[in-house]
Image: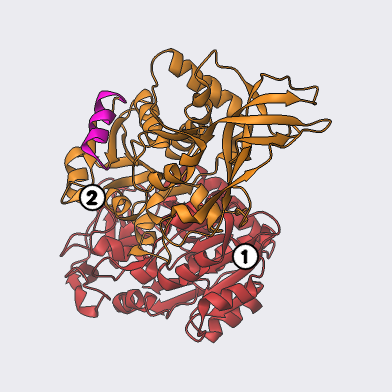
Chain colours: A red, B orange
Amino acid sequence: MNKVLHLKSRPNGLPKATDFEIIEQQIPVNNLGELLLKSIYISVDPYLRGKMSKTYSPPFELNEPVASKVVARVIDSKNESFTAGDYVIGYLNWAEYQLSNGTGLSKIDNHDASLSAYLGVLGTTGLSAYFALLDIGKPKPGDTLVVSGAAGAVGSIAGQIGKISGCRVIGIAGTDEKTELLKSKFGFDDAINYKTTPDINAAIKAVCPNGVDVYFDNVGGEISDAVINNLNNNARIAVCGSISNYNDTETQIGPRLLPLVVYKRLSIRGFLIADYADKFTEGVSQLTAWLKDGKLTYSETVMEGFDQLPEAFIGLFEGRNEGKMIVKV
Amino acid sequence: MNKVLHLKSRPNGLPKATDFEIIEQQIPVNNLGELLLKSIYISVDPYLRGKMSKTYSPPFELNEPVASKVVARVIDSKNESFTAGDYVIGYLNWAEYQLSNGTGLSKIDNHDASLSAYLGVLGTTGLSAYFALLDIGKPKPGDTLVVSGAAGAVGSIAGQIGKISGCRVIGIAGTDEKTELLKSKFGFDDAINYKTTPDINAAIKAVCPNGVDVYFDNVGGEISDAVINNLNNNARIAVCGSISNYNDTETQIGPRLLPLVVYKRLSIRGFLIADYADKFTEGVSQLTAWLKDGKLTYSETVMEGFDQLPEAFIGLFEGRNEGKMIVKV
């Protein structure tokens, strides 16, 4: 039998296990031109929340599969471009088995890195960190970079690229284990546990005595208010995510940002990895080189079993992941 | 006698006449290398509010003169680069007479345009509209551009450059006279009087059925909330001013912006004209060409007499100006 994960209801606030349903079906049979794929690693990402509630376009449909980047193995091929045994990556359904005509699939090998790395440091995650930091954040040697959601998949890579760019790098995360890891494993200069810090604004000021030049934001909300409060003139904010807001059921209010944009001549940009599609090859080759040189490392939280997908997704909003959240099917 | 306007106290909220003091002094005498200048036109700008309360750096000092762009005539010159009778523009004190060593002064003539135009359409005002719209707003033919504070000095020029760039242009202003003028004189496609519109969000949606691609913001606050609510994906906000916030005595709250920055991949940038100093010649020559071709027109509100300076400045926050606010000394 095959398992497929459907979106059963649009989450209201924090997603619940009952928003999803795992359907059992026959394993499909591939026709001429088609491949039968078996999922190996499924990428579990915060941005999918927006597609569940129509905030991100196109949204997922109710009673249809959720989808994301998936690493799969070709089980059977009736398509001359692929052979049984090939490993591929593509935007695929959350299913154990599925058919594909090959469109949008890329073959990968596991010589340069483990297969799961293609969902993380060598995939959309790593490329997001790379282009958002370098193209929007424009870090210069000597700049102070603050990364929120710093122990997450994108944040931990963004911080390391900040170090490679010559910045002083400060991470914000939600447990002491994570802040320790930022310093010991990822080479951040300092880290703040926002859950145990009574005054996050003062904590940022204390570790950024020269102010903040680049803010790589994955979280939004009050953490961002505090970082923004410490920005220097001409600072840049690369807005890569806003996980504190993804489960909002109504518009949140907070300090108005536009006056500061004027006073401090801030530059703020939201990030869409698809805008950089023509530079993916450049990005992957640079990330691969840094990995080989030991300048870049990464973390993964791998949950085992297709049935873990709802828990893995909900866990993102509870900070249960360290680095990239992946389900191994 | 000479008159000089001092900042007497830092305004708390809306500036009051008593925040300023006009001092009578002897007319100064120029030494070797110096010019004696007589002010003719003084530029009265919203951004000066920030320098009065230390929000903009460097701030004005208490019991020292306020300063801005001024057109002046050389009364006497002991500097070989200038001759009595020359007209100059520079960042000068709010004074009838003052000395200068010539640093930062540019000679102007009144052949291409009236002298006051060098404070407006051919000065910082026109250049701000030009660079903020083109460089930050990146208008494309067919885009919908919304301009707030549209009947103001910068807004009225930004809207016209939007039309030259092939945009559909909507202006927001605070009186029916102003909205009429936007359409009849400045060629805007439509205009909204925010003071008489019960639902500004619905009004914008009605006149922008395809959403908003570029927002040229001079005002901030609830008007900006409504425009932002109607932005398309990948929209750009050129933040040129935030006049609704300049008199705030505490941080205002409003809808959080960062989630939308992510969802809609917005690009938001604050504007500082000084960043474009190396392109001023290009900007002035383009603006002059448009003026001569009749593609660009402008409005001025000229108040007569040095003593009118406090009233002129306070009037900016009451919308008493149409186009550039200038005091003729």
The residue closer to the viewer here, B169 or B39, is B39
Vertical side of B185 occupied by A70: above or below: below
Rendered-image quadrant of the N terminus of chain A = bottom left
**Which label sits on residue A31?**
2
Residue type, numbered disc 1:
Gly
Q: Can residue A134 be seen in this view?
A: yes
Residue placed most toward the observer, A49 or A250? A250
Horizontally, residue A212 falls left or right of residue B221, namely right
Q: Is residue A123 visible?
A: no
Element assignment for label 1: loop
Instruction: Give the residue type that dot 2 points to.
Output: Asn
Looking at the rendered structure, the secondary structure element under dot 2 is loop
Q: Callout 2: few (<14), some (14-19), or many (20+) C-alpha neighbours within 10 Å? A: some
The part of the chain drawn in magenta is B174-186
Q: Report the disc number at residue A28.
A: none
Front position among marks 1 and 2: 1
Q: Establish if A129 lies above or below B179.
A: below
Question: Is label 1 on the same chain as label 2?
Answer: yes
**Residue at 67% across, 57% down:** A165
The answer to which quarter of the image holds residue B204 is top left
Please give the residue where the numbered disc 1 appears in the rendered image. Answer: A211
Between A166 and A314, the residue placed more toward the observer is A166
Q: Position of residue A166 (x, y in %)?
A: 70, 59
Give the spatial CA distance, label 1 vs label 2: 60 Å
Which residue is drawn at the image coordinates 60% and 82% (left, top)?
A: A180
Quarter of the image with the C terminus of chain A is bottom left
Q: Nearer the viewer, residue A23 or A245?
A: A245
